[in-house]
Image (spheres, helix red, strand yellow):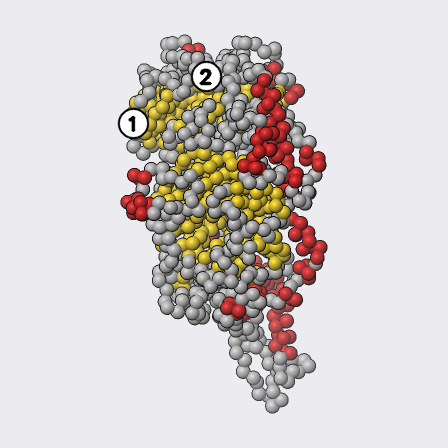
Amino acid sequence: MSSLSRELVFLILQFLDEEKFKETVHKLEQESGFYFNMKHFEEAVLAGNWEEVERYLSGFTKVDDNRYSMKIFFEIRKQKYLEALDKKERAKAVDILMKDLKVFAAFNEDLFKEITQLLTLENFRENEQLSKYGDTKSARSVMLSELKKLIEANPLFRDKLQFPNLKNSRLRTLINQSLNWQHQLCKNPRSNPDIKTLFYDHSCSQPNGARVASPAPPVMNVMQKPGGFPQLGPHAGTGVITPQATALPGQLTGWMANASNATPISHPAMSTGPLGLAVPPNSATLLKHPASNPHVDYHSADSEHVHKRPRPMGTSEEASIPTAHLPVAYASISRNQHGIDELPKNVAVTLNQGSIVTSMDFHPSQPTHLLVGTNVGDIAIWEVSCRERLVHRNFKVWQLSACSALFQSTLVKDPSISVNRVLWSPDGNQFGVAYSKHLVHFYDFNGREDLIQHLEIDAHIGGVNDIAFSQPSKKLCIVTCGDDKTIKVWDAATAEVLYTYEGHEAPVYSICTHSKENIHFIFSTSLDGKIKAWLYDNGGSRVDYIAPGQCCTSMAYSADGTRLFSCASSKDGDSYIVEWNESEGSVKRKYSGFCKRSIGVVQFDTTKSRFLAAGDEFLIKFWDMDNTNVLTTTDAEGGLPASPRIRFNKLGSLLAVSTSDNCIKILANVEGFQLLRSLETRLYGASRLVAEAKASTLSPLGTVSAVPGTSTADADRSTQVAQVGALSGDNRTIADVKPRIVDELLEKSNVWKLAEINESSQCSSLRLPDNLLTVKVARLIYTNTGLAILALASNAVHKLWKWPKTDRNVSGKATAAAVPQIWQPTSGILMTNETSDANTEEAIHCFALSKNDSYVLSASGGKISLFNMMSFKTMTTFMPPPPAATFLAFHPQDNNIIAIGMDDSSIQIYNVRVDEVKSKLRGHQKRITGLAFSNVLNILISSGADSQLCVWGMNAWDKQGSKFLQIPPGRTSGPVVETKVQFHQDQVQFLVVHESQIAIYEARKLECLKQWVPRDGLVTHATYSCDSQMIYASFTDGSVNVFTSTLRLRCRISPAAYLNSPPSSNIYPVVVAANPTDPYQFALGLTDGGVHVVEPLESQGKWGTAPPLENVVGSNTSQPVGNPNSDQPSR
């Protein structure tokens, strides 16, 4: 539906409300889905009118749309169920359970079972979680408060909770204005006209009493009933698409334009499909300018060729408004001058790439890291602040035998290859490279030289012209397009083809991925100028459109994702940048200022959601997005090609520009110069520390290993920085650059220092109260909600601490600022594992918590027990020893399947529901000490007391690989030493913890990426923080180290900081647990039975700061291990 049709609905809603048609108002709100009336919803909920509540909601969302919607419907149906139970209406409750609540069993079967069990209770308030349930009225009020929060957070309700601010009776006012206008056009207007109908145009009667016939009003022609979407497949020679009714997800209606059922207007070059993924009403322009002809020409001063061509169908005349008619703001010199000052126009750095630059991209979070691809196929990563090339790779095929025969023969005939596109992934941990022949390379990048070959894909026949990233289902995907006229979507973890889109009739030139209101889609453009749009399904193209230029077109959104632009260069040399009206599928604005005959393909970029830039006429041209005229230009001190490549960094403070002599110039604004200067001074400071560190003694923490890219030969960074300019063909330092706009205060840089926490006043810690027997803690975990901590002591007894909700702790989250309660049910029973005849102190203890925190599986040398976390009752026991269970892990996709590590070195895949061992895995030589699932890679990683890692496929439970840990020289691994494993949040890398080391491994190849070795003492345990950005590690001396995710030490916490008593060699942490919602909080389980919660001071908010990549002091215990992809030898 067009934006004007949408506004008409709001006007009708206002009219109906003013006329007191209450039921009709809410019916229209629900059917249109444009406005969610929270007041009506509240009234229905508080009245318990559940049928109306769900009916009204159905116009805006469905149960399975997203997690917010699911929670909304669940809370409503749960309340209906509880009210039936409270009224003792058992039959009604059962009916609600089976008809309304059973749908949620597919998502959480344990929760459904728990709800079902409420039928067995005389009063459902006996359930601990429902013990505070009051009367019906208060319960509805509490639920309503929760529902409002969920609705406000739900993206499907975005922009639907506020009614437009309209003057009273706006529709009546518009009708009156229309009638007044009609009356003014009368040939014989009467002073007091008698208007009795709105069905026909008004006209005063002729003097003789005759009436003038009136046609139907134009507005009735404009507001057409929405139709369908363009038909797929080849189009007729006229280029016109006949709208067809095609189903589309309901969520799209909130922002996509709909089709018109009016007859399309034929055009020789343009199809009528919209850009908003649906056919727009072709009368949208007529609505704005009723007297205009849809075939009027462009009026552009910069292209006579375009002036002679028919204007594309659906193009708004706003694109051709004369400059004199632009808003006054754009004539303001102060605004233009302010905008010019924000643009990076002055040359700060020149990099000597050595070959023609074909593509560039700045890192999403490291604003001075620049990824570059060239015409000879090589790639590089530059640290532009010091002109240092961190990584350089020449092109090579990683695995030729896996490539197609066609590609192999093509490479034999012509081995030359170039880079078409380089692009960082959204998190900056990977990047993709699209080549001119068949291939896409996908690398992992974790800093400086940590470049790992991840995927090589023979993606397309011919060139791969563009690459993009998307996360349509929270899973990273790679999108590619190529000369074979297809677009493909690949799983970034496995290289599996998820979707292949066909429909273009020419090579696909570029792609643009985006999402709006949780709807993910892809725009694609081909060399014949066609624009198509695709959803992540097999439904075909939703758009078939022709862009101005009809040739090489690229598309991009503004940084805030609200405005869509395209840049095109035609075969005749004409170039265009336009802004699109997505809701109507028309060109909203066309930017002027291009050379009449541009050379090559013009490249463009956007920044700050305000500016556009393009390389044209050996210049960089800049536009304010709201002004079609060129704002300013720069020649970057000369040396640019006719159409240079350009790329802004994400801050908009730097602009990379390619030059004719195979270099890259970095242009900067004031903030850009400050950024570069601050990094350069930090490098000088680091170089002095390195020089001092050479003569100093080694840190007692561990073995000294250089940070990747740094060695004793090049450690003196002051010399290196002085020379690197000469090596890159530029002798200037940033201080020499004109004009000098760097603040002198930036020269006083702060050198990074390791955070040392040695006293209790430097952090917040709390020993949890315990009225039970205190014996050594064997296992420790937070509940998934972060509201409680569960410990398993070495006497096989579980302890659970819960934080009550108070004025100081409203959420009831775990915190060191409030004392929790050790919780027990009213029955007083304890969750105690069955044990064997052996000493429980020597038994192997293990447990695993279900995702909904309702159940815990646990073992202490005897049978495995399944406990109810609310009642502490033992639900069942199974698998009596021997062999005894030594590790437990729930399957990530099915809570009924458990992986059980055994002390006989086997792993059993057990189905609890059917009480059956589905598979038994053998590959270890000693007992299993760790298990971790990767849902992304579909594998299970196991570790054992034999210091071996094994990879198992989750489909056939087959062994896919194994590797023994690299035990550091001089260290021995004891016969019962545990090796723990835990996946990073990306589900690709994983943490390995052994008493001799902490290491980071890549799961597919079992390749050790990083290793940290303590010099004194042993590692007792380590774990990732909840966001995987930090690693907490404990040691036998009682200390805790906080590392970055790449094992660079950022903070050291001594035992005196958290122990209430003087440190003792017998008291130290055995296990560390990370808070699942707060990345800076962790808990320690000690040998004396104590459990401590530790977090930084509120004034600090975090554990120190991450050491800079250039700094080697404080990270001297982290080293790369056996990285074959590094330019430097392993150290």
> Could you tell me the amino acid type at mark 2?
Glu
Q: Position of residue 67 (x, y in %)?
A: 48, 42
Residue hosting label 1 = 919
Which quadrant of the structure image shows residue 981? top left
**Is any part of residue 943 visible from this angle?**
yes
Residue 439 point in image, percent of width and height = 37, 44
Amino acid type, callout 1:
Ser
Mark 1 Cα shell of 10 Å, populated few (<14), some (14-19), many (≥20): some
Q: Secondary structure at mark 1?
A: strand
Distance from disc 1 to disc 2, alpha carbons, whole Å, reads 31 Å
Identify the residue shown where x is 48% and y is 21%. Answer: 1012
At 47% from the left and 44% from the top, the residue drawn is 355
- Relative to 1035, is 330 above or below? below
Task: Tell me what residue is drawn at x 59 percent, y 78 percent.
Answer: 202
Instruction: Residue at 30%, 25% (x, y): give it.
Output: 921
59 relative to 899 in the view: left or right: right
724 left or right of 275 in image: right
How busy is the neighbourhood of tag 2: few (under 14 within 10 Å), some, or many (20 plus)?
Answer: many
Position of residue 798 measured from the top left corner of the image (x, y, whole percent): 47, 19
In which quarter of the view is residue 208 placed?
A: bottom right
Taking the view exactly as shown, the residue that stands out farthest to the bottom is: 208
Tag 1 near tag 2, CB within 8 Å: no
Viewer-nearest residue: 647 or 819: 647
Camera-side residue of 144 and 201: 201
* Residue 317 seen from this side: no
User: Which of the numbered marks, if any, corresponds to residue 68?
Assistant: none
What mark, if any, has residue 995 been given in the picture? Answer: 2
Q: 856 or 358, which lies in front?
A: 358
- Label 2 residue SS: loop
